[in-house]
Amino acid sequence: MRLGSTGRTGRALLMVLASVVLMQGCSTRVGKLYFDFRAYFNTYYNAQDFYELGLEKNIPEPTIPAPGNLIRVFDPPGSGGKGEFDLTIQKAAKILREHERSSYVLPSILLIGKANFYRGEYFAAIQKFQELRTLDGTGRYGQEAVFWQSRTLYEMGNHLEAIDFTEQALLEGEWIPSIESKTALILAEHHTIAGDITTAVDLLTLTIEQFDDDRLRPRAQFLFAQMLEQEGDYAFAAEVYRDVANSKTIFDLQYLARKKQAVALRKLGEREASLDILTEMFDDDKYRDQFPEIRLEIGLSLVDSTDGESIEESIEWHQQTLRMDPRRLRNGTLPPEFRAQSYSAIADLYRSQKNYGMAATYYDSASQVPINRNRVPPSYKPQETAQIYGEFLSLTTQLSHADSLMSLAAMDSASRQEKISQLRERRAVDWRAQQKQKREAGESLVIIDAEGESQDEATESQYGFLSHLNPERVTDKQVQFQALWRGRPLSDGWRSEAIAQALNATPDPIMSGLGEGDAITGMVSGENGEAEDPLDDIDLETYMPPDNQLGINLQEIPLDSASRAQMTTSMASWNYELATLYYLSLDEPQRAKDRYEAVVRDARDPELKSRALYVLTELYASEGTPKQATEYAEQAIQLDAVDEVVRRLIQEYGDGLSVAAPVDSQMVRDSLAWAQQQREEQALRGLIDSAKQIDSVGFATQTFVDSVWVDVRGAIQRYVDEYSSAASTAQAGADQSNQWESVLEYLTVADSLIQKHYGTFNLPDQEVEEPSVPDSTVFDEAQMDSARADSPAPVDSSARANTPAPVDSAASPVSTAPVDSLE
């Protein structure tokens, strides 16, 4: 009985213990759920709600990049939602204080970091992301922290730091694919800013398919396509652009993707496919606002490098764009950016045909159009291009004019007069044609004015106020303006220039009766006081205008030798500038060579000639003709006009030269003076090495070598005297003794050049213990005599007169005595 009672009691105790254990486990789970329930509904839900409201106010509308720029996948934070983000931080911080046992601690830290990011508090945001990584390591929230910290560093501009940090983090742990893809994407954006497009392409190639944000995915693909295009993979880029154009994204990005697809196909050589896409877009009214840009791209795609007719077709297309019907354009006018780019496109086509004169004209027109720099690619710089081609046009005009004058000067008197008469007649024909055109324009002016008033009311409703949308009307008014002002130059001070030209003009019988000021506009006072044009009463078929109106000045012909020499010098300078333009700007090496050779032939300035020779060595070397390059290098070295040119040519062609090159004596003497002033072991070694180099280079004259060694030996002897004196030896410490021993060892090295020049020095042999030297390097008396016999003879006064002046004694008291005086 007692035994059975004990059994029942044991079983009861076991049941109680099991119940306690079970209840304790249940209470842990239930407690966890309870804490999470309270944290979520009391605080975290509100914090997340405030964060979403802040995002709605903060994130700007999606934008497309400016032309030529890479798109940003993750837009920068805006300026709105500051209040909501403040509330987010307050609510999330409450969880950290009051619900530290809940599962929402890590999400709350992430919320605080993101809220600080959108508030622009980047350092506070990074602090929270680092704290989150410390708590979660490589977990989900730790990986999110890596992405957001990298994105914060992007906004701070710390791209190199972000690259190191993000790459290291991506190597740690097993990443969740969706987080890994967006982290790789922000890393790729860092690499694009750093200029490493290849690495960015590799990153996106591996992770772009895992990027699952439907809103940002088209932007990520567009960035990927832009990178592929920069890398030259136009086929792959066109495919990705097509995917973006067919995706559900904003209209502007769809349009830009389709246009870029056509551009990539054009670069790939698929001209017809590119034209098909662009033509389809041009015929679609939903792209009406983009018509000018589409027309510009069509004109570029019309060009076939193997077909000359396609170039003419493209030029005509661009010219039609400039004359486009205003009714098909936004605001009834062609945007200035596309007007300028159309001019530049025409100029590029003329440039491809080597017609640099027409190219310069259209580049100048493009540079005169005021544009918004944010609406054109960063590489589009019409002013710089216009300046280059303007200089080209000016130089070619000057050279052509000077060449004509030199040709006239070389003729005998009769031939010269005949040539001038032919020139007068040819220019008179052009002048008469211009005057007829002006007269006809003046007559049409009256007719247009007579009909214009009756048509204004009828056409105003159709073509807008003052018919500004009527292209014919606008053209007529432009003709009227030109007829009225007779081509007045578009520059300040034109009236003063006209007066000066009139005062310096050759008297004209027709214009001789004009009053003061009338010659400026070509108008005179008639019988009734009304303005009349004196040219109206002349017969344009027979009238011969004076030379000044034909642009002929006989005083410019260089008939004497001094004038011809001056003009030849000017032509050499112009040829050098033109050759430089051909070489550096126009990529015309053959024409550059011809011009540089003309400079070498005609230039009287040694410096100009030397620089032309140097460039010719580069041109011939790049063509694989080293023999010709060496010949020009030797000419430049013998000329010895520019030290920098000589040094470079000696360095590049020294082994193959057959001329004695001059040595930059001033540079050598400056180096010697510096070394002598240092009074240090290393400086002395450098001094000797410099002299050895001069002796061994093979280009210096022996007179100059001897003069250099005189200075070197003087410096060595003073060094020996200073450190071997009794007083110096008594005061010298161990370091100084070791220094002196190393100098002696250096001086006694068996070197043929040093033996030749310092063998007669009075080196001490008693006061300072010389280091042991191998027998092969000990100088016996025979070697000394041999060295003395081989040393150069003393430099006489006539030889020294031709050597560079010694260093100023105040700076460096170097003895310039003959060799024997130092023995």
Image (tube, rainbow, N blue to C red):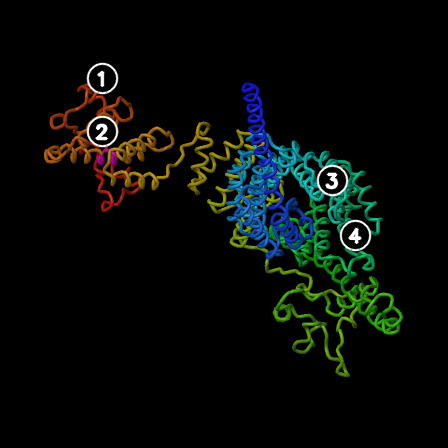
Magenta stretch, residue numbers: 709-715
Q: Which mark is residue 241?
A: 3
Gap between marks 2 and 4 measured at Cα: 83 Å
Q: Main secondary structure of the magenta part?
A: helix
Could you tell me the amino acid type at mark 4?
Phe
| Residue neighbourhood size for the residue with mark 3, other residues' Cα within 10 Å, grouped as few (<14), some (14–19), many (≥20) | many
Which element carries disc 2, helix, strand or loop?
helix
Which element carries disc 1, helix, strand or loop?
loop
Q: Residue at x 44, y 38 (%)?
A: 646
Gap between marks 4 and 1 measured at Cα: 91 Å
Q: Residue at x 35, y 28 (%)?
A: 696
Q: Residue at x 74, y 49 (%)?
A: 252
| Residue neighbourhood size for the residue with mark 1, other residues' Cα within 10 Å, grouped as few (<14), some (14–19), many (≥20) | few
Dot placed on the residue nearer the N-terminal end, 3 or 4:
3
Q: Is residue 514 visible?
A: yes
Q: Residue 156 location, x and y as percent?
A: 54, 48
The residue labelled by disc 2 is 743
The residue labelled by disc 1 is 774
Could you tell me the amino acid type at mark 3?
Tyr
Classify the position of the C terminus by image quarter: top left
In the rendered structure, are the residues bearing label 3 and label 1 in contact, judged by CB atoms less than 8 Å apart?
Answer: no
Residue 47 magenta: no
